[in-house]
Image (tube, rainbow, N blue to C red):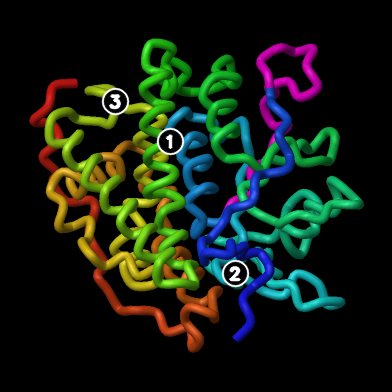
Amino acid sequence: MDRPTWIQISDTGDFKRNPSTFRNFISKDPSSQFPAESGRYHLYIAYACPWAARCLAYIYIKGLQNAVGVTAVKSKWGRTKDTDDHMGWVFPSSSTEESGAEPDPLNGARSIRDLYELASTNYSGRYTVPVLWDKKLKTIVSNESSEIIRMLNTEFNDIADNPTLDLYPSHLQSQIDEINECVYDGINNGVYKCGFAVKQGAYDEAVKNLYQALDKCEEILSKQRYLCGNTITEADIRLFVTLIRFDEVYAVHFKCNKKLIREYPNLLNYTKEIFQIPGMSGTVNMDHIKRHYYGSHPTLNQYGIIPVGPNIDYSTTHDRDRFSM
């Protein structure tokens, strides 16, 4: 079975992730090209995608639901055009087609691909989520989640319901950046390196790095409540979106089965605590997550069979309050 064109593999069999293309920045400065205005911007997400989920998390925990609209695509990839065989994120034809997914309310787009082609007639990259859309200029502001969350953290504070929450405080930025680098390379992207490796050596290296990073986080969280101390930061949101998918998807689908998150006492309780932060549970649609991964990668799961478990209840009691805030 042919590998999808979006999966880029090196000569050594390693999975490579292409960089994002749209890198504009919304600013609180009203004279900027993209000023922070209530009702002007719209976030397109897939619940299955961890990069999109962390942007949605910021919408909820910063209290921006009334300022930035959100639309979720269908869980499984579909044909994005009738004229070719490209498979990608698509919108449902009605709000009742799939629970949690909605038709595009702004442009009537059939797919995320349509939005990219509306924004740039000569676009030739991947059609990824998240997409932060400017309704006024009818274009994509950004498709880089790490930069979108920074905008949502600071630039909308004048219209946010929770403006005092700062997930990237100045005194912790160097520490957050250091943790982010480890977590991204070893864990966030690390699970993909395991899952899409096409040579044993590439997989072995990826899985070694993944578990070294998980062990490091487990050790950190045995001594303090969050990754950068006793205050929740951007680093925690970025780690959470992978942890919440790990046992349900990555352990099976991406062959990350050396040790499960529920076997790490600190990581498990930490995941529960973040899940229970008001708004965070709304970013986790496990039905969408499982249907996407197991149903959209036929090179890994030819028949689209969805495993029955483990169905972990992250709303149960955790022990993280043993650390002072």
Q: Residues within 10 Å of mark 1 (few under 14, many from 20)?
A: few
Quadrant (top left, top right, bottom left, bottom right) of the N terminus: bottom right
The x and y percentages for residue 138 are 84, 40
| Residue in the picture at 64% in, 43% down | 43
| Residue in the picture at 37% in, 67% down | 249
Question: Distance from label 2 to label 1 (Cα)?
Answer: 40 Å
Mark closest to the chain's N terminus, 3 or 2: 2
Asked if the residue under mark 2 is in contact with the one under mark 3, i.e. CB atoms within 8 Å, the reply is no
Residue at which label 2 appears: 96
Quadrant housing residue 252? bottom left
Quadrant housing residue 42? top right
Q: Which mark is residue 228?
A: 3
What range is drawn magenta here? Answer: 27-45
Mark closest to the chain's N terminus, 2 or 1: 2
Residue 172 colored in magenta in the image: no
- Report the predominant secondary structure element of the magenta stretch: loop
Residue 40 colored in magenta in the image: yes
Amino acid type, mark 2: Thr
Amino acid type, mark 1: Glu
- Indicate the secondary structure of the residue bearing disc 3: loop
Quadrant housing residue 238? top left
Residue 103 in view (yes/no): yes
- Indicate the secondary structure of the residue bearing disc 2: loop
Residue at which label 1 appears: 181
Question: Distance from label 3 to label 2 (Cα)?
Answer: 42 Å
- Indicate the secondary structure of the residue bearing disc 1: helix
The x and y percentages for residue 20 are 67, 44
